[in-house]
Image: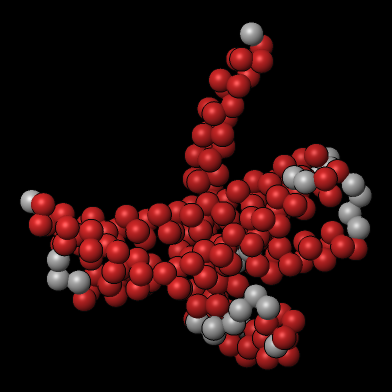
Amino acid sequence: MIAFLQDLLIRAIEIVWTNRYWMSWNLFLALIPLGLSVMLFRGKVARRSPTFAWWLGFLVFVAFLPNAPYILTDIIHLINDIRIEPSIWIITLVYFPLYTAFLFAGFEAYVVSLINLGYYLKRQGWGRSIGLAELTLHGLSAIGIYLGRFLRFNSWDFVTRLDTLATSLVEDVLGKAPLIIMLVTFAVVAALYWLMKRITLAVLTYQSIPCTKSLEA
């Protein structure tokens, strides 16, 4: 038993070490819009009237936002790893927990980012626009995910390769097959967001109850 656990631990370290670069990079990109959402929608800047710098930051937020749900597409790496891994124990005890934590962290960054946006819209008196804003960003994220996964564009290509990106949008993305893929992606992102938003808000509400009771006491 001890030998089995030692082998399992060694193999787990090897797997994490092998995947550390692309997982860390993709997770870093997913956390960028989360950090921007805190600054733009929750920080001191959010209490002032939108300035040019705020709008510029908002455009960067929208450009990087698809990187968070994009992590869901990295499940293809899990499928490939399962195909070549002979041990069911490694698959069950290492690969599944690792990828579950990775996918959850990336998508939760997306959920919290949009929750922060909704908080900002509500404070500005635009609470009725929250649903429309979420659906719009789901759609833009679906387009961004397709551009990233299939055409291999990055968020910064909106600045460095705008002409190439625009050409691809017209020539490639507007085809029948890409539109179907983006519609399916939109549906998956919207459905998961609807579920995770409610879970996240429920957890946040539950955690705030003890604090509220202590203040009332």
Residue 105, placed above or below residue 14: above
Residue drawn at 49 percent across, 45 percent down: 195
The front one of 42 and 25 is 25
- Across and down, in percent, residue 101 comes to 40, 54
State left or right for residue 52 relative to residue 206. Answer: right
Residue drawn at 54 percent across, 28 percent down: 207
The front one of 183 and 119 is 119
Q: Quadrant of the C terminus?
A: top right
Q: Is residue 17 visible?
A: yes
- Across and down, in percent, residue 175 comes to 56, 84
The outermost residue toward the left is 1
State left or right for residue 214 relative to residue 72. Answer: right
- Across and down, in percent, residue 178 comes to 53, 79
Residue drawn at 22 percent across, 74 percent down: 83
- Across and down, in percent, residue 18 comes to 35, 73
Residue 38, placed above or below residue 204: below
